[in-house]
Image (tube, helix red, strand yellow):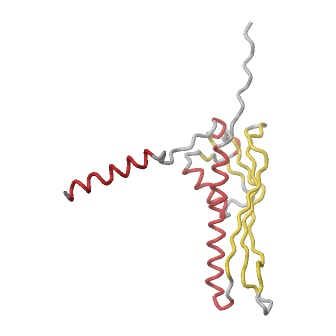
Amino acid sequence: MHRLTKTLLPIVALLSAAGCGFQMQGRTDYVEELESVYLQMPNRNSDLARELRRSLKVADVKLAPTAGEATAVLEVTRDNSGREVESVSAENRPREYRVFYTAVYRVTSGEEVLLRPQRVTRTRIYTYDELEVLAKDHEETLLRGALAKEIAGVIARRLATIEVPEAPSSPTT
């Protein structure tokens, strides 16, 4: 009886998942113009640059070594992060900080603009403790990395929605 349960349980789970419309996430199809993308960044070593390269590789987008070899250019014109005081204590000392990451990007293919400039900003708030300065610096660094990863995901998903209108066919005579 135990063997029968072990065999049937995974089958029932799979059938239930299929019945509810669940579908494994597959490979995203990009338009032909995004066959080979050159990533143009203000800082090629930033968190966002690393995460974008990773996200595009995972999505099977070929990264071109130069703009001339690419079918499209993903140009990130703004890639910056920082922090702001969110709240202070009664002694006027920072208690919470807001970490932010902002990117502005656009996509071109030759002279054609596939995607006009888009702005993406993500923020997180974390508590600050003067007695744990090193730990809080590490937490902030991890948060910036997570925000960059989130923005890279947003950009990769946005690239998948690009549609290029077909050229009108010429009339035949």
Q: Is residue 17 above or below residue 162?
A: below
- Callout count: 0
Q: Is residue 62 left or right of residue 24?
A: right
Of the pair 148 and 127, the residue shown nearer to us: 127
Residue at the (48%, 45%) spot, across then down: 21
Q: Is residue 9 above or below residue 94?
A: above
- Dividing the picture into quadrants, the one containing residue 133 is bottom right
- Dividing the picture into quadrants, the one containing residue 90 is bottom right
Residue at the (72%, 61%) spot, across then down: 43
Q: Position of residue 53 (x, y in %)?
A: 61, 54
Residue at the (73%, 78%) spot, across then down: 97
Q: State whether residue 57 appears in this view.
A: yes
Q: Position of residue 9 (x, y in %)?
A: 31, 54
Of the pair 27 and 32, the residue shown nearer to us: 27
- Dividing the picture into quadrants, the one containing residue 81 is bottom right
Q: Is residue 170 left or right of residue 47?
A: right
Please, which residue is most extreme toward the left here?
1
Of the pair 113 and 5, the residue shown nearer to us: 5
Q: Is residue 64 above or below residue 121?
A: above
Q: Quadrant of the N terminus?
A: bottom left
Q: Is residue 96 left or right of residue 19?
A: right
Q: Quadrant of the C terminus?
A: top right
Q: State whether residue 23 appears in this view.
A: no
Q: Position of residue 38 (x, y in %)?
A: 67, 47
Of the pair 6 and 143, the residue shown nearer to us: 6
Q: Position of residue 76 (x, y in %)?
A: 74, 54
